[in-house]
Image (tube, grey):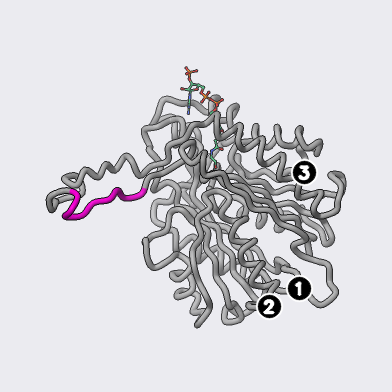
């Protein structure tokens, strides 16, 4: 059977660095509170880069790293909850800029698990033989949907994009994705959410002059979160997923060289490491510099881990995420 191999990684983050002290000028918080509760020191906040800009830059870097021509790509999946347009999709916007004629392109929303969902989705097309080369992007300009007056959320997030190029493994080669798991629990949707537009048309309210007249409250299109509930969901589900993924891959915990988790909170990662009896040193972390970049975080971390030489050929690597939905997912890879 064909397997899916990651042949290139790339990432991009805006150059505007916002420290915890900078955020403390906006809301009643402190570097001490943010660092000790989350591990976050700074994040990148876009002052000009759009979602498409960031996705395009990460994609370009991944394609260069894979050493292929953009025209070789036949599928683009973009995981995002903050596209520039309801339509066209961010994936189509990137396809147009890359001039990848004819490739299938669509977006996918699994919130912070988006990168894992997109990777697994693309791998199904590759494993069936429908496509040979896929570009997977996780991107969020999450700063667009933050309530910058809510200290319980605005301190946590940052903007960015991560991307990978996927290809089919050579015949008989055991590299690439060994196993994957996707999961969701919609009954917990309200613990982490951001409302979209409300129903509004001439049959609901009298024809309106402005969004305000329509009762559209800008404040509703921002992230609302029950932090402790999300924390508990994350620790429970990510721990269970890692254990299940290791079993399904027919491996032991000690065979795993590196775990690249969604970068939300160092305390979540440390609790998961303890539950799984895996040293926390095996969990790659860069959330101190980026905060939680939502759909982008695993892609950015994977690119940094790869470029830092933290991944060697034959390493067994786990990518694992959780996010709004609630969603969660994991992939076990033989790194090539
Ligand atoms: O991609 C998924 C995204 N979300 C997550 O992963 C979030 C998961 N949850 C968490 O990471 C943690 O729950 C938080 C970091 C969000 C919060 O940490 P916590 O230890 O659960 O704090 P808390 O919500 O229990 O709040 C403790 C106190 C409260 O004050 P009182 O009621 O004890 O007086 C909050 O009002 O901290 C206060 N607080 C803050 N203080 C200073 C909340 N946010 C801040 C802040 N600065 N930024």
Please tell me which residue lies in front, 48 or 271.
271
Answer whether residue 158 is visible to the viewer in this image: yes
Q: Earlier in the sequence, mark 2 or mark 1?
A: 1
Q: Earlier in the sequence, mark 3 or mark 2?
A: 2
Which residue is the site of mark 1? 2
Residue at point 71% right, 45% down?
241
- Residue 239, percent across and down? 71, 39
Q: Is residue 166 left or right of residue 215?
A: right
Q: Is residue 225 left or right of residue 148?
A: right
Give the SS element for disc 2: loop
- Residue 305, percent across and down? 70, 53
Q: Quadrant of residue 234?
A: top right
Q: Is residue 226 left or right of residue 69?
A: left
Which residue is the site of mark 3? 243
Whether 199 is among the magenta residues is: yes
Magenta residues span 196-204
Whether 198 is among the magenta residues is: yes
Measure the alpha-carbon separation of dots 2 and 1: 8 Å
Count how many numbered circles sit on residues in the image. Answer: 3
Residue at point 52% right, 63% down?
78
Which residue is the site of mark 2? 129
Give the SS element for disc 3: helix
Quadrant of the frame with the C terminus: bottom right
């Amino acid at each position: 059977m064909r397997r899916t191999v990651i042949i290139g990684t790339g990432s991009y983050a805006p150059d505007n660095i916002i420290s915890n002290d900078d955020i403390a000028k906006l809301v009643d918080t402190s570097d001490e509170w943010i660092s000790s509760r989350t591990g976050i020191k700074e994040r990148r906040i876009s002052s000009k880069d759009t979602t498409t800009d960031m996705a395009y830059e990460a994609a370009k870097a991944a394609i260069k790293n894979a050493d292929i021509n953009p025209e070789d790509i036949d599928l683009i999946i973009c995981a995002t909850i903050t596209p520039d347009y309801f339509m066209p999709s961010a994936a189509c916007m990137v396809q147009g800029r890359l001039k990848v004629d004819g490739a299938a392109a669509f977006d996918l929303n699994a919130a912070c698990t988006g990168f894992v969902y997109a990777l697994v989705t693309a791998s199904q097309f590759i494993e069936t033989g429908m496509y040979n080369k896929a570009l997977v992007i996780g991107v969020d300009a999450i700063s667009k949907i933050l309530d910058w007056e809510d200290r319980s959320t605005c301190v946590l997030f940052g903007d960015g994009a991560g991307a990978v190029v996927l290809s089919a493994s050579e015949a008989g080669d055991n590299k690439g994705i060994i196993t994957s798991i996707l999961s969701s629990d919609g009954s917990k949707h309200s613990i982490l959410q951001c409302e979209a537009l409300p129903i509004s048309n001439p049959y609901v309210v009298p024809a309106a002059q402005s969004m305000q007249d329509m009762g559209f409250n800008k404040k509703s299109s921002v992230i609302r979160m029950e932090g402790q509930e999300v924390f508990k969901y994350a620790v429970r589900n990510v721990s269970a997923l890692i254990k299940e993924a290791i079993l399904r891959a027919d491996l032991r915990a000690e065979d795993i060289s590196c775990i690249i988790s969604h970068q939300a909170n160092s305390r979540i990662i440390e609790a998961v490491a303890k539950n799984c009896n895996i040293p926390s040193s095996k969990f790659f972390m860069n959330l101190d510099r980026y905060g939680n970049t939502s759909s982008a975080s695993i892609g950015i971390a994977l690119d940094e881990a790869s470029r830092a030489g933290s991944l060697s050929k034959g390493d067994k690597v786990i990518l694992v995420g959780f996010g709004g939905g609630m969603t969660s997912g994991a992939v076990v890879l033989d790194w090539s």
